[in-house]
């Protein structure tokens, strides 16, 4: 059975706020629970904590600022929908229970990458998710410590809130892969390559590497995480991994296009910064028209991979994943 991309019209700007309102609310509540558990453990260990060090309340507020306030929640949604595609018979509550640790981990490590990306020594941005970046709302030292905390907490949440039925070997694989993509096989290498490529001629190969690591690795891992926790077969996991790589590339190419085509108000972050900082982007290397064509080509490739997923696994339901692909293709923020 094929997946027909034309069956989903271009989605309006409220798609995530309407279609995924319950899931996004659950993700936000899970993040708050995770933060609160860490905070309550500190207070239980040190009953007079806020009397002794009232300044720690600022660190707590900075952590909330980085995680709970705003965000599309695309990565946990992709993990959740990959899991649901493999287990369409399960209730929402069952999928939430199985994926709570994974969804928290994805959002926390993503938030960490944004906090560090916005620092003056990196991309130096004042706006993120429509609000001041952490180093602007608080200070640079607090932002660094918030990023450090979020990176470590992502592993803690992945394990602490893992579904009761998750086999230890599967959880260990998830931890191993999260470690790889959040360090030298993903975010760190990608950020460094992006940083050292500013103001230089950029080859297609260099651009592909930057995109695949700085943005693509975590987004692709989001689908793998849902598949791993969903006990996908080796064959199905392979297709889902390929789909994740395609969606990671699509997300970044669309980001490059939006940077030069929409306003700061729409983006929730500073528009046009890639041009000002002479970043290596799809637009700077290939031009606007080729970027638009690449968005279409990657979208069609994703739909073909969804078709293959249905062939590989009887009973899989890809309708909601298809909607998310359409959103990633047509989003305006």
Image (cartoon, helix red, strand yellow):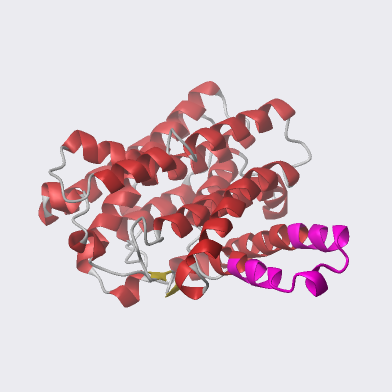
In the image, residue 67 sits, relative to residue 264, either above or below, namely: above
**Depth order, front residue of 57/114:** 57
**Depth order, front residue of 87/293:** 293
Numbered range of the magenta stretch: 38-62
Per the picture, the main secondary structure of the magenta-coloured stretch is helix
In the image, residue 323 sits, relative to residue 168, either above or below, namely: below
The quadrant the N terminus occupies is top left
Which residue is rendered at x = 43% and y = 30% of the image?
A: 239
In the image, residue 150 sits, relative to residue 11, either above or below, namely: above
- x and y, in percent, of residue 164 in the image: 79, 40
- x and y, in percent, of residue 153 in the image: 65, 49
Magenta stretch encompasses residue 15: no
Which residue is rendered at x = 45% and y = 72% of the image?
A: 136
**Depth order, front residue of 172/38:** 38
Q: Is residue 247 visible?
A: no
- x and y, in percent, of residue 201 in the image: 12, 43
The answer to whether 249 appears left or right of 162 in the picture is left
Q: Is residue 109 visible?
A: yes
Magenta stretch encompasses residue 48: yes
Which residue is rendered at x = 65% and y = 60% of the image?
A: 31
């Amino acid at each position: 059975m094929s997946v027909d991309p034309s069956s989903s019209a271009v989605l309006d700007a409220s798609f995530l706020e309407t279609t995924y309102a319950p899931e996004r609310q659950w993700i936000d509540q899970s993040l708050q629970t995770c933060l609160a558990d860490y905070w309550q453990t500190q207070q239980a260990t040190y009953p007079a904590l806020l009397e002794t060090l009232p300044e720690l309340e600022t660190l707590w507020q900075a952590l909330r600022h980085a995680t709970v306030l705003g965000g599309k929640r695309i990565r946990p949604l992709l993990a959740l929908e990959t899991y649901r595609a493999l287990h369409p018979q399960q209730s929402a509550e069952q999928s939430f229970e199985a994926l709570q640790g994974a969804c928290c981990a994805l959002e926390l490590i993503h938030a960490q990458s944004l906090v560090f990306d916005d620092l003056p020594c990196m991309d130096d941005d004042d706006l993120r998710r429509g609000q001041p970046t952490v180093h602007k709302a608080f200070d640079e030292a607090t932002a660094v410590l918030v990023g450090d905390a979020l990176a470590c907490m992502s592993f803690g949440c992945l394990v602490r809130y893992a579904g009761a039925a998750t086999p230890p070997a599967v959880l260990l694989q998830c931890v191993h892969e999260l470690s790889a993509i959040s360090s030298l096989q993903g975010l760190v290498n990608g950020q460094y390559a992006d940083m050292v490529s500013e103001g230089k001629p950029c080859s297609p190969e260099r651009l592909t590497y930057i995109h695949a690591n700085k943005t693509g690795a975590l987004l692709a891992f989001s689908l793998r995480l849902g598949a791993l926790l969903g006990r996908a077969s080796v064959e199905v996991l392979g297709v889902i991994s390929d789909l994740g790589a395609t969606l990671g590339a699509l997300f970044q190419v669309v980001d490059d296009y939006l940077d030069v085509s929409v306003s700061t108000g729409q983006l929730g972050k500073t528009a046009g910064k890639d041009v000002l900082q002479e970043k290596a982007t799809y637009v700077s290397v290939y031009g606007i028209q080729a970027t638009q064509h690449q968005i279409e080509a990657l979208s069609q490739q994703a739909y073909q991979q969804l078709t293959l997923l249905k062939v590989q696994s009887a009973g899989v339901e890809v309708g909601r994943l298809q909607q998310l692909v359409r959103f990633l293709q047509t989003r305006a923020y």
